[in-house]
Amino acid sequence: MAEQTQPAGNAAVVDSGRIPTVVVDDVHVIYRIHKGATGGHSPVAALKRIASRTNAPNVREVHAVKGVSFTAYQGEAIGLIGSNGSGKSTLLRAVAGLLPPARGTVYTKGQPSLLGVNAALLNDLSGERNVVLGCLAMGMQPEEVKRLAPEIIEFSGINERGDFASLPMRTYSSGMGARLRFAIAAAKKHDVLLIDEALATGDHKFRARSEQRVRELRASAGTVFLVSHSLTSIRDTCERTIWLEGGVLKMDGPTAEVCAAYESHK
Ligand SMILES: Nc1ncnc2c1ncn2[C@@H]1O[C@H](COP(=O)(O)OP(=O)(O)OP(=O)(O)O)[C@@H](O)[C@H]1O
C-alpha cells in the first residue's frame, strides 16, 4: 500500500481474510475547463475571487466523480459500467494516479498500470520495436523481452494478414493498435491492471484470447479493473461489478446482479 490500508470515512470495510489492493475513499474528481480569455484577469479581480472563494468567470467545473468509495482485493476482476459520461474513465485515471482527487483519497498496492486505447506507442516505429520499447518501459529485462516478443506479436494477432509487425504502427487500423497495446501490457504481471475498453476493439477471436488473459492475470494474484460498454465482456471476465451513474456509485456487487439491475434501468 502506498499509504494506509484502513481508510477513514465511509470506504468499504477491509475484509480481514483478503489482501486489499485498491482503497478508494470518498473520492471526488472535478475537471476545470478554461473557456478562453474573457476578462477578469486583473490582480484586483483575482484577489476578489480568492477572498470570495469564487472561480474565474471563464472557468467551468465538471464534477465527474462524486464521493465514490470501495475496496478492491487481490485476485478480483472488477467491471466498471455506466452510461456515457458517468465517470468510469475518470475514476480509472484517478486510481492510476493520473488525476488528483479534489477530495478523498486513493490508496493502492504498488503502481497501478492503466491500459487504455490511448496508451502511448510510437507511430513511426514498427510494431516489433514498439513491443521492445513497451516491455522495457514496463521494467522488463532485455533477455525477457527477447523471449516474450514473439509471443506478444502472436497474441496481438497483427500478423494474421501479413507481416505487419515489421511495418510502422501508423499503417495499422485502430483495432490492430489497441490489440498490440493490450498484448504488450498483458505480458507483464501487474499488481493492479486497469483496462479501459481495450477488449471491445478486437474481433471475436481476439476477445476470447484477451478475456482468457485477464482471467490468468487475476489468478496470478493481481487485481484487474475493466471499463466496458459490453456487458458480455464484463460477465465473461468479472465476478464483481461497480455501476456508476452521474459520477455516483449506484451499485457494487456480484456481476450478475449489477448487470441485471443496469439492464432493467436502461
Ligand atoms: N478532460 C476532460 N475535461 C473536462 N471534462 C471532462 C474531461 N474528461 C471527461 N470529462 C467529463 O467528465 C464526465 C465523465 O467523463 P468520463 O469520460 O469519465 O465518463 P465515461 O463514463 O468514461 O464515459 P464513456 O462511457 O462515454 O467513455 C463527463 O461529463 C465528461 O464530459
Image (cartoon, helix red, strand yellow):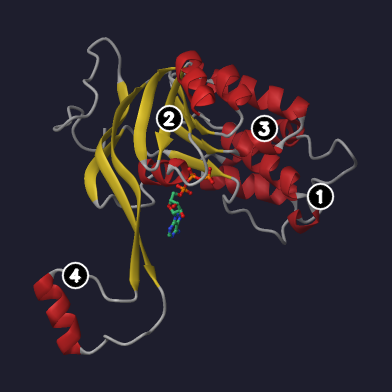
Q: Are marks 1 and 2 in contact (CB under 8 Å)?
A: no
Q: Residues within 10 Å of mark 2 (few under 14, many from 20)?
A: many
Q: Secondary structure at mark 4?
A: loop
Position of residue 180 measured from the top left corner of the image (x, y, whole percent): 69, 41
Looking at the rendered structure, which numbered label has been put on residue 243?
2
Vertical side of 106 occupied by 120: above or below: below
Q: Secondary structure at mark 2?
A: strand
Looking at the rendered structure, which numbered label has been put on residue 238?
none
Residue, x 57% and y 49% (percent of image)?
119
Q: Quadrant of residue 123?
A: bottom right
Residue, x 23% and y 42% (percent of image)?
105
Q: Would the CB of label 3 be found within 8 Å of ligand 1?
A: no
Question: Disc 4 residue type?
Answer: Thr
Which label's residue is closer to the chain start, 4 or 3? 4
Which label's residue is closer to the chain start, 1 or 3? 3
129 with respect to 166 (left or right): left
Tell me the quarter of the image containing the N terminus.
Answer: top left
Which label's residue is closer to the chain start, 1 or 4? 4
**Residue labelled with disc 4:** 54
Vertical side of 28 occupied by 235: above or below: above
Q: Secondary structure at mark 3?
A: helix
C-alpha span from label 1 to label 3? 17 Å
Position of residue 239 measured from the top left corner of the image (x, y, whole percent): 48, 16
**Residue positioned most to the front:** 265
Looking at the rendered structure, which numbered label has been put on residue 166?
1
* Circle 1 or circle 3, nearest the eye: 1
Residue nearer the viewer, 57 or 23:
57
Question: Disc 2 residue type?
Answer: Trp
C-alpha span from label 1 to label 2? 41 Å
Q: Are marks 1 and 4 in contact (CB under 8 Å)?
A: no
